[in-house]
Amino acid sequence: MGHFALTIILLLMIALIAACYKIYKMKALLDSYRSGFDISELKRAKKIVESSEKRYKNIFSVMPEGVILYGADHKKIALNENAYKMFNMDSKTFHEKLNILEPIFPFVDTEGNPLALEDYPVAITFKTGESIIGRVIGIKGTGKTRWISINTKLLEPMDSADVPQVLVTMTDITKQKETEINLRESNALLRTIIDSIPIGIIVINTDRKIVTLNQPCHELFRVEEPIKGLIGQSADKYYLPFYKYCEEEREKVKRILANNMPVVDEVEMLNNQLIQRSYFPFYMDEELKGHLWVFEDITERKAMERGILRAKEDAVKANMAKSAFLANMSHELRTPLNAILGFSQLLEIQETLNEKESTFVREILKGGRHLLNLINEVLDLSRIESGILKLSVESIKIASVIDECINLVRPAADLKGITITKKVESENEYVCADQVRLRQILLNLLDNAIKYNRENGEIIISSVNEGDFLTVHVRDKGLGIPPEAQEEIFEPFYRLENPFIEGTGIGLSLVKQLTILMGGKLGVESQIGVGSDFWMSLPRDQTNEADHPVSLEKIEMPLPEHKEYKILYIEDQLSNQLLVAEILKNVQGMKLLTARSGMEGLRAAANQKIDLILLDLHLPDMNGEEVFEKLKSNPQCTDIPVIALSANAMKEDIDRIIKMGFKEYITKPFDVPAFIKVIVKKLR
Ligand code: ADP
């Protein structure tokens, strides 16, 4: 309660006491004169006094405070029920026991120390005549301490028969006090936590004065002044000077504070410590109340990161050196092997060899081929690792490659009586892959499926469309692979114990690396005794319209019948020129002109009226993109639609080309009906 309110209540009570006192005196007077006066007059006066007394009693009884009147003669009058309640007793016990000078309850001050009798508020007011307002004392009862706020006021005696009295009003503030104690405790706990975390925290108000900071923050900035002395001081003056680039940081801090957005950055200290600094604005009810800065020493962490990075670089370098060494060695080994294999083959066809000699030559050849295979695979692996293996990714019809590979391995499968079944969802699925490497992967998986199969076993090769990817499964009903080895078989030179089956242990690791290089994934699911399912998924080529094959007859040609369209095909490969010429022969009203270089193409486009240009992106004199730019900068050619033709089916390249302004991007090998359809569409 505010002092003003307290003072008003106090004044009101004094008025009440004075009135009571007067009534009391008047009653006594009336009693003494009762016999000599007119009875009815007396009765009337008595009634007035009684009703007035009742009214005041009522007022006291509804007051939340306890009110007591202490006399200098040690008499006390409790003016309302609350007075007893404050001491947790009834009126009888109160009047019998509670003596101002001999209290039955120990009183304590706010710190919990016992209060000396002369320090009791009533005693002080009697002694000094001074009023006391809002003095808090504790009453230590049997249970927990009760806290009361006390006001006192000295009432001077009315006449010589009277004694001075002290009016005491008491408010029970136990709940408030407990809340305050709890708050203090939780604050102390919070403070301990904040001081014990190894992160510096400082809170600054909107005037950029320090509100609080923790011990680690104080230590980080090595300020000599104690924390207490810093509260309320300008924050800039405090920590900015400890930054290495003080002026730049000052500007940076200004910008951060102006933006009021959380920021995390790094800052260097004068002593070369590296600090991660985080800023958070502090809002309450959507109003900015202050700024929280958090500082974490990351010097060691950074040094460690740098060490790890250096170690990684060293490891990469060492690995590259190893790969380069392997590549060179493999190359060196191939040369003599060429002679071994070459001459063995010549020997093999010699008719003069006897049976024994022929067996020897076949063994030399077998060993030589095995060695060549091993060298080739090691060479590929080391090329992949050193990043020099280049792939030529294009759009490939997967069903055709599967057919091709089945044909190649069928003789070996027949030898073991193994059947190979192809189950593809669609014959017209295309993947983005390097043709040679894709064949190498499938052959490898099929070879293994035969090698590790049982006599008269079965292999099923299938393809499943999975949205952006197409997955090829090579399933066999062979030995199976134990679960613990299903990861390791993809490591170079890892082989399961199998003395009767020859192998190098490199195939699967190479296959996996190649698949990853083509943006795909490779894995296995296998059960011992049941068989294995080696699967490989590759990015599907969805730009290829071959998904919905269109027959030549079905292509609508709503081109004006009498018009002849001139199509210029800029392409250096004669076979491609012939192919396109052959295709366009089937389409009425189209005339194909060809150019074998960029320059030749540009000249042809400028000299005659061309309706459409087909542009190969790999030309001998300049690349297709340069040709395109030159075409667009020539006003005579700028409006001619240009279609790019390329074997490269990488999505980012296609996107880049289309962005440049090419009308279409056709990947080779192209699907003929779809190819014609695109040309007709662009001519229309
Ligand atoms: P290689 O066949 O030359 O030993 P790979 O790298 O192709 O090397 O295969 C590694 C190992 O994985 C093989 O030695 C074999 O133990 C196991 N493996 C590969 N394919 C199969 C399969 N289809 N069924 C059972 N085991 C297989």
Image: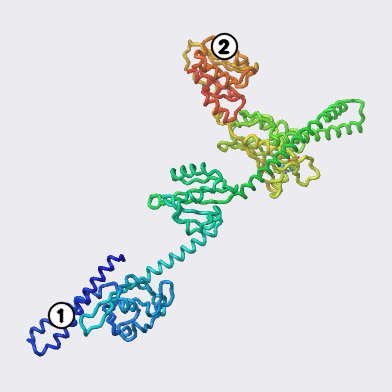
Mark 1 → mark 2, Cα distance in angstroms? 129 Å
User: Residue 106, position in %: x, y?
Assistant: 40, 80
Question: What is the three-letter code of the residue carrying label 2?
Answer: Ala
Query: Which residue is at the front of the view, 663 or 231?
Result: 231
* Occupied quadrant, residue 630: top right
Dot placed on the residue nearer the N-terminal end, 1 or 2: 1
Q: Is residue 156 above or below residue 611?
A: below
Q: Where is ligand 1, by quadrant?
A: top right
| Residue found at x 28% / y 78% | 166
Pair 1/2: label in front: 1
* Structural crowding at the residue carrying mark 1, measured as other residues with C-alpha within 10 Å and reported as few (<14), some (14–19) or many (≥20): some
Which residue is at a point 68% across and 40% down the rendered structure image?
A: 313
Q: Report the quarter where the N terminus lies.
A: bottom left
Amino acid carrying label 1: it is: Val
Q: Residues within 10 Å of mark 2 (few under 14, many from 20)?
A: some
Is disc 2 placed on a helix, strand or loop?
helix
Say whether residue 498 is visible.
Answer: yes
**Residue receiving disc 1:** 49
Q: Residue 563: where, in percent of width, then height?
A: 49, 11
Q: What residue would you read off at disc 2?
A: 604
SS at badge 1: helix
